[in-house]
């Protein structure tokens, strides 16, 4: 019987220290964005802050403090705000998809219409110094906050079209990646679900043979302090 090798349910986990860089509206924090096919969850382990979210239902701000669990579905624009040393364990559905580009930043519309312009603003230099990485991460964060604030103003004024236009642009930007994502999903979440189905079939037959294949996995982060969209990330291979 095949055994899925990733974390339970093909969930990805990382440790996040949310950026404390101030931006145009005086708040400190991360880069607003949405995911197209992945739900995301936060378990707050230190500090305080909030997550600002924007959906077709409107704007919302949810406080974050140690012990809080907050999660949201695809299409939720989210912006982390760091008030005092905010640290989070991040859980991502469909491990492998976010790393393959399942996120679109709320850049202003002129950056969303041209894939090359979007990539130039959104992708950090691969081999730059830490100072270069930080400058690029701050610049894209500030640009995404600009776009986010415009979307929020329009939504709160009762105009749904800018948010709907952002959704359309986001889907168009990632469309070329859909088949690659489908393969990753099949090797991850689908494989994990099918493994559980086979185990249930075995239990229904009174067959516990798969229990002899039990294994323990343990690892340390594969990378520490990566510049992510919302802060500095410690990430795992699993």
Image: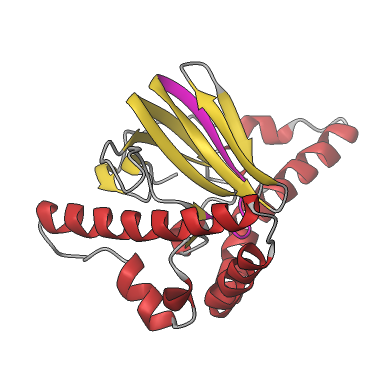
Is 43 one of the magenta-colored residues? yes
Give the residue furthest to the top: 67
Q: Quadrant of residue 139?
A: bottom left
Of 223 and 68, nearer the camera is 68
Give the residue furthest to the front: 157
User: Which residue does the image show at 82% across and 37% down from the upper left?
Assistant: 200
Q: Quadrant of residue 59?
A: top right
Answer whether residue 163 is visible to the viewer in this image: yes
Q: Quadrant of residue 177?
A: bottom right
Is 177 one of the magenta-colored residues? no
Image location (x, y in percent) of residue 97:
53, 59
User: Which residue does the image show at 56% across and 30% down from the upper left?
Assistant: 62
User: Which residue does the image show at 83% across and 32% down from the upper left?
Assistant: 203
Q: Is residue 108 left or right of residue 152?
A: left
Q: Is residue 170 above or below residue 187?
A: below
Of 85 and 26, nearer the camera is 26
Q: Is residue 83 left or right of residue 214?
A: left
Q: Which image quadrant: the C terminus?
A: top left
Image location (x, y in percent) of residue 53:
57, 43
User: Which residue does the image show at 63% across and 58% down from the upper left?
Assistant: 37
| Numbered marks: total | 0
Q: Is residue 49 above or below residue 94?
A: above
Image location (x, y in percent) of residue 47:
37, 20
Q: Which residues are the magenta region?
A: 34-46
From the image, give the main secondary structure of the stretch colored magenta: strand
Q: Is residue 215 above or below residue 78?
A: above
Image location (x, y in percent) of residue 108:
44, 68
Answer whether residue 74 is visible to the viewer in this image: no
Of 11 and 52, nearer the camera is 52
Rendering colour mode: secondary structure
């Amino acid at each position: 019987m095949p055994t899925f090798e990733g974390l339970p349910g093909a969930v990805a986990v990382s440790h996040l220290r949310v950026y404390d860089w101030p931006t145009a509206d005086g708040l400190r924090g991360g880069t607003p964005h949405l995911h197209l096919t992945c739900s995301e969850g936060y378990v707050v382990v230190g500090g305080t802050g909030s997550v600002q979210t924007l959906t077709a239902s409107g704007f919302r701000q949810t406080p974050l403090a140690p012990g809080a669990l907050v999660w949201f579905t695809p299409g939720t624009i989210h912006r982390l705000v760091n008030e005092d040393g905010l640290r989070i364990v991040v859980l991502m559905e469909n491990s492998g998809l976010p790393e393959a580009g399942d996120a679109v930043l709320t850049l202003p519309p002129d950056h969303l219409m041209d894939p090359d312009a979007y990539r130039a603003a959104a992708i950090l230099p691969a081999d730059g110094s830490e100072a270069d990485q930080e400058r690029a991460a701050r610049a894209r964060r500030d640009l995404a906050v600009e776009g986010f604030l415009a979307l929020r103003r329009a939504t709160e004024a009762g105009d749904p079209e800018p948010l709907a236009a952002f959704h359309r642009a986001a889907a168009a930007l990632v469309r070329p990646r859909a088949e690659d994502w489908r393969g990753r999903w099949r090797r991850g979440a689908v494989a994990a679900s099918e493994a559980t189905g086979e185990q249930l079939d075995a239990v229904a037959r009174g067959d516990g043979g798969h229990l002899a294949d039990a294994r323990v996995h343990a690892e340390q982060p594969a990378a520490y302090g990566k510049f992510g969209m919302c802060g500095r990330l410690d990430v795992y291979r699993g």
